[in-house]
């Protein structure tokens, strides 16, 4: 490792940090993890062990770490409900930041973080690692080459997402906590929105959706979403659930189609990939974009390489915080549409209660006349006949 390597401080030592982020940075030439921080003793110990750091480089808070260590940039891998203070403190200290998704639980807070980064001239990137999966890149390449003609519709199925618990030493079910996570499976799989924009090559203009808690009838977070995303030219259907449904990708063009599936029709992209098929006027072609590596786990390598190079070369990363803010707004527009029974345009208005308060802002909006979910506890909405809220 070079003596001039960029120095990364890691805040938040949950499963994804220990299993994905730190090993990926360890494999980089030109960057290294020099300190870790987490308020839970067992988690900071796990992060320190993987990063191969002495005890003196492990801390209980970001501020303690930043006071004691010389850093160049920070990975903010803490729950979104507590992220803003850490991110803005890092900017104030002259540090660049790459943030786990979602960027925040409230678009208003995301906007303030972005403005602070701009005013201080800091790089602000997102962990949008699905952009680096080879099957999605191949789809975009084939579309760009005109192999399917004009894009009409993309169907993305993520109906078999595992409801993976957090680490036992923290709160294993924090993703089921509305205040901490900002929502359920949709916030867990917020990847679907930036992936849709990447595949379509444009920004989402509006959403209509179904949102429910079919498998979690007594909880405030959703486990089932069917969303239709409106683009200036074409549509994307996003179907996802914490369940055992099918996965895969289907692309409809004016002169061709693309189909990508995983072993036993499981939900990708962390499943064993089978093949990607292009069918157009010239015939049928089958691709193996993972080149024999049917289970792939190095997208974090590409992600961290990109952000490292952005910091080193003074350029924007592939996934910016502005992308993360649009993704967050799309998720909250999905919640609004599902709960209020109407199509929701994007971007959200800055005076929209959901823009200001996140999903709990729905409580301030009168329900649609057809509201089959009103009797459920989803998002803490007032059940029919209950006047206590």
Image (cartoon, helix red, strand yellow):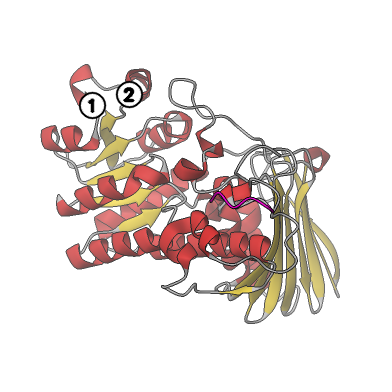
Residue 153 horizontal side relative to residue 302, left or right: right
Note whether residue 320 is visible: no
Q: Could one spot residue 160 in this view of the protein?
A: yes
What is the magenta segment's predominant secondary structure?
loop
Q: How far apart are the alpha carbons under marks 2 and 1?
A: 7 Å
Magenta stretch in the rendered image: 384-389
Q: Quadrant of residue 121?
A: bottom left
Task: Choose between 311 and 347: the one closer to the eye.
Answer: 347
161 inside magenta stretch:
no
With respect to residue 258, does 66 lie above or below?
above
Q: Which residue is labeled 1 in the image? A: 59
Within 10 Å of the Cα at label 1, are there few (<14), some (14-19), or many (20+) other Cα atoms? many
**Residue at horizontal 31%, vertical 29%?**
38
Q: What SS does tag 1 mark?
A: strand
Residue 107 picture location, percent across and down: 42, 62
Q: Which residue is mark 2?
A: 44
Residue 46: x and y, percent?
A: 38, 20
Left or right: 256 in relation to 122: right
The image quarter in which residue 165 lies: top right
């Amino acid at each position: 490792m070079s003596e001039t390597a960029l120095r990364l401080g890691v805040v938040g030592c949950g499963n994804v940090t220990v299993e994905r982020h730190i090993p990926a940075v360890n494999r980089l030439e030109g960057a290294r993890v020099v300190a870790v921080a987490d308020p839970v003793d067992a988690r900071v110990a796990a992060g320190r062990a993987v990063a191969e750091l002495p005890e003196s480089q492990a801390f209980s808070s970001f501020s303690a770490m930043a006071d004691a260590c010389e850093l160049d940039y920070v990975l903010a891998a803490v729950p979104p409900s507590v992220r803003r203070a850490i991110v803005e403190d890092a900017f104030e200290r002259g540090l660049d930041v790459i943030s786990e998704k979602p960027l925040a639980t409230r678009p208003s807070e995301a906007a303030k973080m972005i403005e602070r980064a701009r005013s201080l001239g800091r790089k602000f990137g997102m962990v949008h690692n699905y952009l680096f999966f080879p099957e999605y890149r191949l789809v975009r390449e084939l579309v760009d080459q005109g192999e399917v003609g004009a894009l009409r519709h993309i169907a993305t199925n993520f109906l078999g997402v595992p409801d993976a618990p957090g680490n036992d030493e923290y709160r294993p079910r924090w993703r089921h906590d509305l205040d901490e996570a900002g929502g359920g499976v949709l916030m867990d799989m917020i990847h679907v929105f930036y992936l849709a924009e990447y595949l379509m090559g444009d920004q989402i203009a509006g959403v209509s959706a179904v949102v429910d808690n079919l498998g979690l009838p007594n909880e405030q977070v959703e486990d089932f979403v069917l969303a239709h995303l409106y683009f200036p030219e074409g549509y994307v259907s996003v179907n996802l659930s914490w369940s055992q449904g099918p996965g895969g990708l289907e692309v409809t063009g004016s002169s061709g189609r693309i189909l990508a599936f995983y072993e036993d029709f499981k939900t990708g992209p962390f499943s064993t990939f089978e093949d990607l098929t292009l069918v157009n006027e010239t015939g049928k072609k089958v691709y193996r974009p993972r080149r024999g590596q049917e289970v792939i786990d190095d997208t974090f390598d590409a992600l961290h390489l990109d952000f490292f190079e952005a910091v080193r070369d003074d350029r924007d990363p592939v996934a910016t915080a502005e992308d993360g803010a649009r993704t967050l707004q799309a998720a909250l527009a999905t919640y609004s549409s599902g709960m209020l029974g109407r199509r929701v345009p994007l971007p959200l208005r800055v005076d929209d209660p959901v823009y200001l308060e996140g999903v709990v802002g729905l409580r301030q909006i009168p329900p649609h006349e057809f509201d089959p979910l009103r009797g459920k506890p989803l998002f803490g909405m007032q059940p029919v006949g209950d006047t206590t809220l």
